[in-house]
Image (spheres, rainbow, N blue to C red):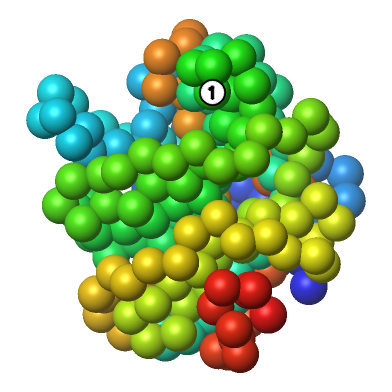
Amino acid sequence: MNLLEDIRPGNLGRFSWQHEPERWQTLPGGGLRVYAPAKADYFRDPAGKQVVDAAPYLCLKVEGDFVAQLSVRPQFQSTYDSGCLLVRHDAAHWAKVCYESTDFGTHAVVSVVTDDVSDDANGPDLAVPEVWLQITRVRDCFGLHYALDGRSWHMVRYFRLPAPREVQVGMVAQCPVGPGTIIDWLSFSLEQRAVANLRAGI
């Protein structure tokens, strides 16, 4: 079930914005188009050079184990432009999986896990316009995955991140270094259940 189908300006349902963008609109078929501003990012640099905690983030509160899935289509214009799926406790404890324009000139699945400071790990390079991203939680363990068809999941990360029972889960539109970009969130679903295998995502 695509939870974005009923979202309209003035009617976000269960969702709420953090850093609402100046412009966003609905797409035919139930998605959203988000205009990410310049310097939009979530990152706590391991070298301590910068801490950025301000990108358009449409999220909802979730308790306990869950499976969240996002179909995302970025309009890559600058390095690090990306559409992401993010689970967040607070500014210092969160994780995201993104479809990103990398500094190596590729488009790749990228993951970041933040426990006071962020790491940054590039996954597989892809040459497709849109990708499915997934985050799964079982207690304090999480899995990050991607799929090309929304069914056949490939592991990106498996990790532990202590977090309270209630966290925020949702979608991010990023443009860390460019003048701004457009990110389409095509479909978002959330199931409150535990997967049998966090590494496989199923």
At x 41%, y 14%, the residue is 177
Furthest-left residue in this view: 48
User: Viewed as shown, does residue 107 lie left or right of 178?
Assistant: right
Q: Is residue 132 above or below residue 22?
A: below
Residue 100 position, x and y percent, is: 58, 31
User: Viewed as shown, does residue 159 lie left or right of 81?
Assistant: left
At x 21%, y 57%, the residue is 115
**Between 16 and 73, which is closer to the camera in this rendering?**
73
Q: Secondary structure at mark 1?
A: loop
Residue 199 position, x and y percent, is: 56, 73
**Between 81 and 141, which is closer to the camera in this rendering?**
141
Q: Quadrant of the N terminus?
A: bottom right
Residue at which label 1 appears: 102
Q: Quadrant of the C terminus?
A: bottom right
The kind of residue on which mark 1 rests is: Thr
Residue 114 position, x and y percent, is: 27, 52
Q: How many marks?
A: 1
> Is residue 158 at all visible to an observer of this figure?
yes
Q: Residues within 10 Å of mark 1 (few under 14, many from 20)?
A: some
Residue 76 position, x and y percent, is: 65, 20
Q: Is residue 144 above or below residue 173?
A: below
Q: Is residue 202 above or below residue 91?
A: below
> Is residue 33 at all visible to an observer of this figure?
no
Q: Is residue 57 above or below residue 66?
A: above
User: Residue 62 sits in which quadrant?
Assistant: bottom left
**Between 177 and 126, which is closer to the camera in this rendering?**
126
At x 46%, y 67%, the residue is 158
User: Viewed as shown, does residue 155 lie left or right of 71?
Assistant: left
Furthest-top residue in this view: 179
